[in-house]
Each structure stands twice: as structure tokens, then as C-alpha cells.
Image: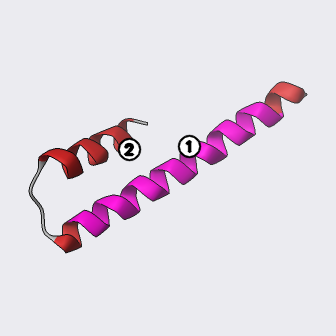
Amino acid sequence: MAVIKNYATMMRDVDMDKTRREECARTIIAASERLDTLVANILKLNKL
């Protein structure tokens, strides 16, 4: 979650070129997908 927050904050606060902004967006998407998988796995374990 910290990665998502930090990259989003950096994108908001720092003047950056398009390439760097796209890289930050890819990092946010990847981190959110990992977080989604983690939450899904926790919910599956909770059902056991």
C-alpha cells in the first residue's frame, strides 16, 4: 500500500516527463494488482 501512496503522491507533487509518469503509473497498477491478489487470498483463507 505504501508503494501506491508514494508513487501517487510523487506523480501529484513532482514535475516529471511523460516517460517517468508512465513508469510511475505502471508501478501503481502492478502494486494494486498484487494488493488485490493478497486481499483475495486472505478472504479465501478466512472461509476455511
Q: Is residue 30 magenta?
A: yes
Q: Which residue is mark 1?
A: 35
Magenta stretch encompasses residue 26: yes
Magenta stretch, overall SS: helix
Q: Are marks 2 and 1 in contact (CB under 8 Å)?
A: yes
Residue labelled with disc 2? 4
- Can you tell which quarter of the image residue 2 is in? top left
State how far apart marks 2 and 1 are (Cα): 10 Å
Q: Viewed as shown, does residue 34 lie left or right of 20?
A: right
Residue in the image at 56% along x and 49% along y: 34
Q: Residue at x 30, y 68 (%)?
A: 22
Amino acid type indicated by mark 2:
Ile
Q: Residue at x 66, y 37 (%)?
A: 39
Answer with left or right where residue 43 lies relative to residue 27: right
| Residue that appears at 30% across and 66% down | 23
Q: Residues within 10 Å of mark 2 (few under 14, many from 20)?
A: some
Location of residue 31 in the rendering, given as x and y in whole percent from the top left corner:
46, 50
Residue range of the region highlighted in magenta in the rendering: 21-44
